[in-house]
Image (spheres, helix red, strand yellow):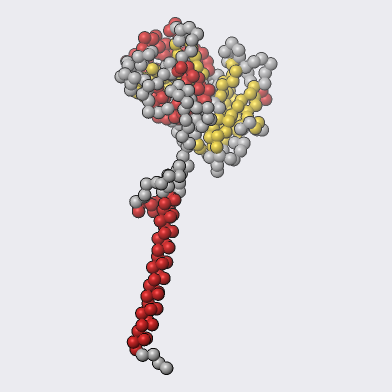
Amino acid sequence: MPLPAADIWGVRRSVLITGLSLALCGLTLVGIGEWASGRFESAAPDGGAGVPLAASSYEANRLAPVRPTLPVLPETGDHLPAGSPGYTFRRDVPEVRLQFTVADEQGRAVTNLSSADVRVFDNQTQVSRLSEFERDENLPLQIGLVIDTSDSVKRVLPEEKAAAMKFLDRIIRPRTDSAFVMAFGGEVKLWQAPTAERQQLVDAIERLKEPGWGTRFYDALYSACDGQLASGSDGKLVHRAIVVLSDGDDTHSLRRLRDVIGAAQRNDVQIYSLTIRAGQAGDPGDQVLQRLADATGGRVYVARSAQELDGAFAQIEQDLRSQYYLSFPAQQAAPGYHTLRVEVRAAQKLEVRARQGYYAVGQ
């Protein structure tokens, strides 16, 4: 029996209402899913609620890959670095290149080693094969002379300048080497850009003076490592080193010790420190200078008076001209910090100075 027209209209209306209700439920569920996804993606790293993202930023974050960042490492005090080995850098390391010095108990350079005398350990695993091993006294030098002119050391500044001028005049070879002069106090100033002209370097040292109140030790070293001595991509083999005259004190830097070590290791820069300290009592800055030397394969020289500066510079020159160089394939593909250790097999006790590790990213 056919339904009246009024009943047919009522059935159609019920079906329409039901369909619209189901559609609205579906849209609501989709919206909840999108909201939840956005909440989790914009959550703070510590698990707290994050700041809501704008629509364009949200879409960009959904599409763009997230780049890993270096962990923020704590420091245990103004002068004491953290014990973590994270003062290094990330990069792909198909081959590890390492330079080091060897000295006897009297501090004299040992220059007659062969590859058979040396063992290298990468993450405590002995390297089975060295791709390269040599000692080169003629490698081009790129040197940064960084001088502290703050109040704490300005009393010995004239003697430091005189010794530094002799050092650069003696060590720089015009056709192969280059150097720059930087000074810091309350400000960091480049007094001479990298040049092979020894007279320009000497003139710059003569002109430098205290650049403001305060001590920006870390900022100066970071600028020297990551700016003036930044490694290029031309593959040219050079020896990069910084010689810093300072007591290691810092009062106003934006950078920290871990930043300086990371920049030095990233650019294969050795840091040599020269400080004047009368007597045997240590200074809090000594630990900073020692940490810089240990992490980068450099050395700390302590002069008891300004009269000993020439001798200290002569030892630095010997170190810079008595380097061993080796390279080897990375032993493990796993990303992360790799410790490095160099051992020398010899009848006498020897001191080996080499950087302590590298930070590799997986391929």
Instruction: Identify the residue at image location x=46%, y=34%.
Output: 72
Q: Is residue 42 visible?
A: yes
Horizontal side of 236 relative to 184 (left or right) equals: right
> In front here: 81 or 115?
81
Q: Residue at x 58, y 40 (%)?
A: 334
Residue drawn where x is 62% and y is 17% of the image: 350
In the rendered image, the residue lying farthest to the left is: 212
Q: Position of residue 143 (x, y in %)?
A: 44, 22
Q: Quadrant of the C terminus?
A: top right
Q: Is residue 146 left or right of residue 112?
A: left
Q: Quadrant of residue 147?
A: top left
Q: Residue furthest bottom?
A: 1
Image position of 150 with respect to 1: above or below: above
Residue 55 percent coordinates (x, y): 35, 53
Relative to 14, is 165 above or below? Answer: above
Can the viewer see residue 311 in this picture?
no
The residue closer to the viewer here, 175 or 124, is 124
The N terminus is located in which quarter? bottom left
Q: Position of residue 197 (x, y in %)?
A: 39, 20
Q: Quadrant of residue 346?
A: top right
* Residue 330 point in image, percent of width and height: 59, 36
- Residue 341, quarter of the rendered image: top right
- Is 192 positioned to the left or the right of 330 in the image? left
Most extreme residue toward the right is: 347
- In this rendering, the answer to whether 305 lies above or below 113 is above
Up-down relation of residue 336 to residue 151 (above or below): below
Q: Residue at x 66, y 23 (%)?
A: 117
